[in-house]
Amino acid sequence: MYLRDEAIVLQNVVWREHDAHVTLFGREHGKMLAIARGARRWQAKHRGHIDALNQIEVMLASGTTHETMAVARSLRARPQLRSLLSVVSVAGQAADRVSRLTEPHAAEPLVFDVLQELLNVCQAQTQEWTAERSRCMLAACTLKLLDALGYAPELEQCHRCHLSMNEDVGFAERPFALVCRACADRTMQTAPSFSLRLIRFLRRRSLTDCLAVTVEIPALRFACDFIESCYREHVPLKDLQERIPCSLLCS
Ligand SMILES: [Zn+2]
């Protein structure tokens, strides 16, 4: 049986001498694990098409444990994305997070849309991002992925009293919950001004809008730390070490 889809290559890992293990995220089929036989030979038909972060049209032959790549053709390579180290790093980390947060063959079209939007934004960049800009973009993308997967953190109601939270008085209770000022106790970290407003902005607005955001560093740090904590709630402990495929940095 064959399976066709439009997919983004999340990872491409060398396997044996000439083969590759490829992790794909399909618009219709979600995460797929495929073996590309002979992909590393010079004359291989897949060569150049299945690099990480490429958007491809793919046909896979179904197997019991994995798929085998039958046909792969580039739809969008986005070469500009690879020319800026800070930008490709964020895109690579986002792809890695998609892989960690999803199960094979669970259709998640909203996740596909978020990743595609990020890659389009990355492709449009002409200069390196600062460390803060990179953190902000990864956080914005991560929050949108969590929302798309049904792991959306609560940003409107207090975790304890369930009343609406005022814009600028968010407190972290556990690392991943916010409470209002009335419910906060002395053990809790105080959110700097604009933190909650920033997190809500990152949720609601496009990644292009998120790229243009300017905010004080403490608020940015709080927002990014909060989103990071929410992400780590949903990733198995053994997987906490972040990976950026070295193939991405070399291509
Ligand atoms: Zn409260």
Image (cartoon, grey):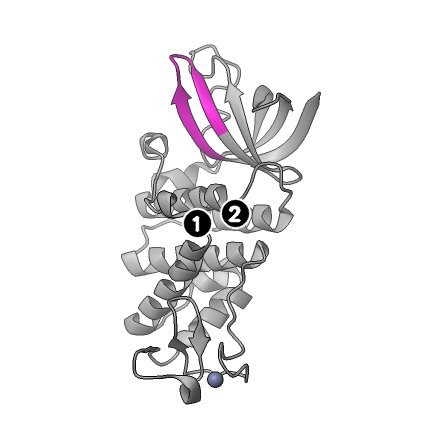
Determine if the C-beta at disc 1 is less than 8 A from ligand 1.
Answer: no
> Looking at the image, is mark 1 or mark 2 earlier in the sequence?
2
Q: Is residue 44 left or right of residue 126?
A: right
Q: Position of residue 198 (x, y in %)?
A: 43, 72
- Name the residue rendered at 37%, 63% in the picture: 224
Left or right: where 143 falls relative to 174: right
Q: Tell me where residue 157 appears, x and y as whole percent.
A: 53, 78
Q: Considering the numbered disc 1 on the image, is that residue within a helix, a strand or a loop?
A: loop
Residue lying at 53% horizontally and 44% vertically, measured from the top left: 102
Residue 166 seen from this side: no
Up/down of 18 relative to 30, above or below: above
Quadrant where the N terminus lies?
top right
Q: Is residue 29 at least partly visible in the picture?
A: yes
* Residue labelled with disc 1: 235
Magenta segment boundaries in residue numbering: 10-22
Q: Classify mark 1: residues with Cα within 10 Å, few (<14), some (14-19) or many (20+).
A: some
Report how far apart the C-alphas of labels 1 and 2 lie in the structure: 18 Å
Q: Residue furthest bottom?
A: 182
Of residues 181 and 70, which is closer to you in this image?
Answer: 181
The amino acid sitting under disc 2 is Leu
**Residue extending farthest right:** 1
**Mark number for residue 27?**
none
Q: Secondary structure at mark 2?
A: helix
Disc 2: which residue:
115
Q: Amino acid at mark 1?
A: Val
Residue 197 percent location from the top left of the image:
45, 76
